[in-house]
Image (tube, rainbow, N blue to C red):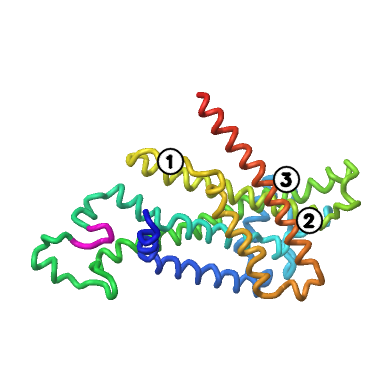
Amino acid sequence: MDMRGKLRFHRQYIFIYLMGFSLILGMKYLYSRADCESLLWILGPTARWVEVLSGIPFVYEPGFGYANHGLRFLIAPSCSGVQFMIITAAMLIFSFSHRVTDCRNAKFPDESAGAGPFGQGASTCSGRQKSIKRAPGTGRPYSQAIRRTGPGLGWMAASLLLSYLFTIFVNGLRIVAAIYLPYFFKRMGILGGPLTFDMLHTMIGVVVYFAALLTIYRLTGFLFDRFRSADGDRPAAPILGKCLAPLFWYFFIVLGIPFLNRAYRRSNGQFAEFALLVTLCCGAVLLLYGLALLIRRKLRGRG
């Protein structure tokens, strides 16, 4: 597909993209102004999941979050994982909305029979078909426009639900790691020098969240490819191509939006240190991920 074809292809989904972008910005705005009580819908399930994983009880402290006083550990609003939920939802919406329609057409090919490459009707349509009301600015009937946007809107709703479930699952793992790993590093004599507790806490979050994003993206793409297996095997994508979407959305929401809001001017250099730490951790995860894919391809090639 040439550049003009790609532009026409993506123009068909511009409504879905605009809706998704507005949704992501709205979620980001609401989260920046949310207090503890307004985040109980995700803090509560996360605390219960952490209890299941670790066996450590947590009690709710109004206005603060879920606390374990013996460990002096608090699951606060900043630990809710809503930002990871926003990143996951954005990645799923913008990476797979168009593929939902493709999979639907592959499953129900009769619905698009007689249609041109961009939804145009066949040239031999009857007079009744010619009189069908068409969507403004397009050559498609309203029914075809609805069929094209309907699956995308459905996938947007599914993406929100999936990102919520993924967030609770992944955030629970991150919190458990944040509870136990400091004790391990302290016994090793690593924690307390150049590696501070805050740095370790940030590193755990970046590694767990970014690795989870790569995994979610990989598994979702695999499921879509399996659904379209009747069309033949898709060519193997470059390793970098398997990482671009998670990498872009993670950096855009974690660093890009704060940078556009000029957070670096109010941080006294802390934003630059945070950005460097995030970049190094993501680079390490990408290196390990790329090596794992290369080894897997080599083993499959030998087989």
Q: Residue at x 68, y 69 (%)?
A: 36
Q: Position of residue 257 (x, y in %)?
A: 63, 69
- Residue 67 numbered mark, or none: none
Q: Which tag, 1 or 3, sits closer to the chain's start?
A: 3
Q: Residue at x 73, y 61 (%)?
A: 275
Q: Position of residue 115 (x, y in %)?
A: 22, 57
Which of 205/69 is in front?
205
The amino acid type found where label 3 is placed reads Gly
Quarter of the image where one finds residue 17? bottom left
Give the main secondary structure of the magenta stretch. loop
Crowd around label 1: few <14 · some 14–19 · many ≥20 (10 Å): few
- The residue that disc 3 covers is 55
Q: Position of residue 174 (x, y in %)?
A: 69, 51
The amino acid type found where label 2 is placed reads Asn
* Circle 1 SS class: loop
Look at the image and give the residue range highlighted in magenta. Answer: 116-121
CA gap, disc 1 to disc 3? 45 Å
Q: Which tag, 2 or 1, sits closer to the chain's start?
A: 2
- Compared with 252, 178 (above or below) is above
- The residue that disc 2 covers is 68
CA gap, disc 3 to disc 2? 12 Å
* Circle 3 SS class: loop
Which of 302/158 is in front?
302
Q: Position of residue 136 (x, y in %)?
A: 27, 75
Q: Is residue 79 left or right of residue 183?
A: left
Q: Which tag, 3 or 2, sits closer to the chain's start?
A: 3
- The residue that disc 1 covers is 235
